[in-house]
Amino acid sequence: MTASATDATPAELALAALDHRANVTLQDYQALCRTLIDDAQRVKKRMERISRISDGHQGELRDTNKKLQESNARLEQALAEVNTLSGFIPICSKCKRVRDDGGFWDDVEGYLGKQSDVVVSLGCCPACSAGLALPTEVSLTAAGDDLSEQARLTAILATPEFQGHALIGHYARLSGDYQKLSRRMHKISRISDGFQTQMKALTQALEHASRTDTLTKLPNRRALIEKIESEISNRPDIPMALVILDVDHFKSTNDRYGHDAGDSCLKALAELMQKSVLAPNMAGRWGGEEFLLVLCELDKAQALQACERLREAVNNLRIEHGKLQLKMTASFGLATHERVLSFQDTLRDADRALYAAKAQGRNRVVAVESL
C-alpha cells in the first residue's frame, strides 16, 4: 500500500526515489538511514506531545470529578440544613403559644427571603406586644440612630406618667454615665479607625512588595504565576503565549564591567519592557537575567511579531553607565499555551525553545512549534 505524494514522509519519498534508480550506492543508503532517523525523531516528539495532551485531558477529568463530588457534598449539607428548618414554628416569647397572627409570620418570612439585612423582632404575638408598647415619645423608632441619648432622656422626662417617679433620678444619672461612655467609645472608635487605616496601608505595601522584584520593580515570579493561573481559570478560551527572555552573555558583562553594570542593564531592560508590554499582558523577572512575558489575546503569529519588535528594541538599546555605553542582545523562547496542558508544560516548552534560540546563534526568537 503506497501513500500519496502529499501524505508521504521524507523517508518514503527518498525510498521511492531509490527504487527508480539503477545504481544505488552506500552513500544513498546512508542518506536514507539519516532521513529515517530524522522521521523517527519527529514522530517521537509528536507522540510525546500527544501523550502530554492525553495526560492533560485525564487530569482535567479528574479535577472535574473532584469538583462534582465537592458540589454534591455541599448540596447534601445544604439540604440537611433546610430540613432542620422545615419544622420551625413561631412561638410567642411571652405567652409561649403559637403565634396565630393572621399572616404576620408569613410577612416576616417573605421579608427575610428578599432582604439581606438582619431583622430583629420582639418575638411576641400581637396580643402580648400590645402590653409591651412604650409611650409614643420613646418608641423604638424614636430611639434609633437618629436620636441621641440626651434626646431620649428629655423625651422620658417630658412624659407625664414618668414625672415624679421614684427611679427617675437614678435613670437620669445612668443616662449621664451612658453619654460619657458613648463619647469615650466614639473616641476609641476614631483611634481604632486610624490604626486600621495604617494597618491597611501597611498591608497593601507588603502585598505589593511580595509581588515585586526589588531591583527591576517588575512583577516577580509569584506575581507572574498568579497572572498565568488567573488567565487559565478566568479566560480559558482566550489564547495565551509564554515567552522566556534571556540576556545574551550576561555573565561576561558582569565579569568585565562589574555587577553594577549588569544591574544597570537589567534596569534598562525592565524599563523598556514596562513601556512595550502593556495590559492585559505582563512582563516580569523570572530569575537572574531571565524574564517572562505573558502575552494574552495573541495567537502564535501575533506573539512572534510582538517578540520580534521587543528583540529589535533590546538590540538598539544603549545603556549609560558612568563613562561607559553598554549594549546587549536577548534570546526569546516562545510557546503557545494549550488548554489541556498545565502551564508548567508550556513553560518547559518555552525553555526548550530558548535553548534552541541560543544554539542557533542568540539574539533571535524561536517558537517551540518550529522545532
Image: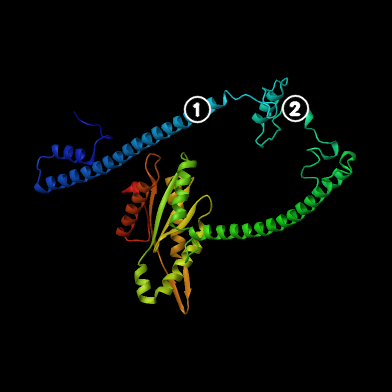
Specify the label residue 80 is tagged with. 1
Q: Is residue 237 left or right of residue 48?
A: right
* Camera-side residue of 54 and 122: 122
The residue lying at 65 percent from left, 57 percent from top is 192
* Residue 195 pos. (x, y %): 63, 60
Label 1's element? helix
Residue 49 lies, with reference to residue 173, above or below; the image says above
- Identify the disc placed on residue 194: none
C-alpha span from label 1 to label 2: 34 Å
Residue 225, can we see it?
yes
Helix, strand or loop for disc 2: helix
Mark 2, residue position: 128
Q: Nearer the viewer, mark 1 or mark 2?
A: 2
* Near-viewer residue (292 or 120): 120
Q: Residues within 10 Å of mark 2 (few under 14, many from 20)?
A: some
Task: Out of 32 and 270, give the one closest to the viewer.
Answer: 270
Find residue 253 and report its horizontal and vertical position in percent: 37, 72
Left or right, 332 with reference to 180: left
